[in-house]
Image (tube, helix red, strand yellow):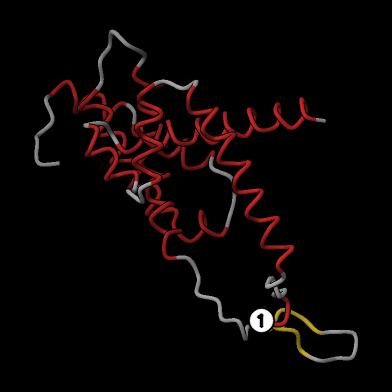
Amino acid sequence: MHETLTTEQQALVSDNIKLVYYTVNKLPDSELKARYKDDLTSEGMLGLIKAAMSFDPAKSKFATYATRCILNEIFMFIRKLNKGGPTVSLSTVVGQSDDGREVTIGDMIADNNSSTDEFDREEDARIKQQLLSEFLSKRKPRDREVFELMKKGLKQREVANELGLSQSYISRIFKRLKKDFGKFKKRREEDAA
């Protein structure tokens, strides 16, 4: 944030600081919230500042808009934390067998080399691809464009830069596509049954 806030924007921020604390406190209790509460609050403050800088009073109430911006910043922070994820070894002990022997993750992984399993996986992939093609043919061009770019391996931020949109908007489009595809697939399965 290299821009300075106008007096009006500073007033919006100072008048709505409690909204950040309220939003962070409304998040579900978790280890992540307990460990990173200060960071979540800081990210929420950034969201509040961004909201003040981009707010258009003709479109919505400030509190509604600011809450969305605050949550977007918090969720982006959480996604960054989750990207690294814990490293787990195949030799990690996950329990004991009936005979008292330690059971590792490697012990639990099934042998998927059978040709029947491979055929089933290929058939499932073919059916899913047909469903996906049919689903995408009924979507808006923007949705198809976002999907195709992400299918090429681009990250949400890269797709956003490519299309001149915000990363949070791309995230919402992709989330909506996944949800709608799940519903579409379920309807097709019900129709087939």
Q: Quadrant of the C terminus?
A: top right
State the SS at label 1: helix
Most foreground residue, 163 or 58: 163
Quickly name the residue at label 1: 106
Query: Does 71 sit above or below residue 124?
Result: above
Judge by depth and name the residue closer to the eye, 140 or 55.
140
> Badge 1 local density, few (<14 within 10 Å), some, or many (20+)?
few
Residue 184 rendering spot, x and y as whole percentages:
63, 28
Q: In the displayed structure, does residue 136 sit left or right of residue 97? A: left
Front residue of 183 and 190: 190
Residue at image point 32% right, 11% down: 59
The amino acid beneath tag 1 is: Gly
Q: Is residue 14 left or right of 132 when viewed as pictured?
A: left
**Left or right: 25 with respect to 116?**
left
The quarter of the picture where the N terminus appears is top left
* Residue positioned most to the right: 98
Where residue 156 appears, x then y in whole percent?
A: 34, 44
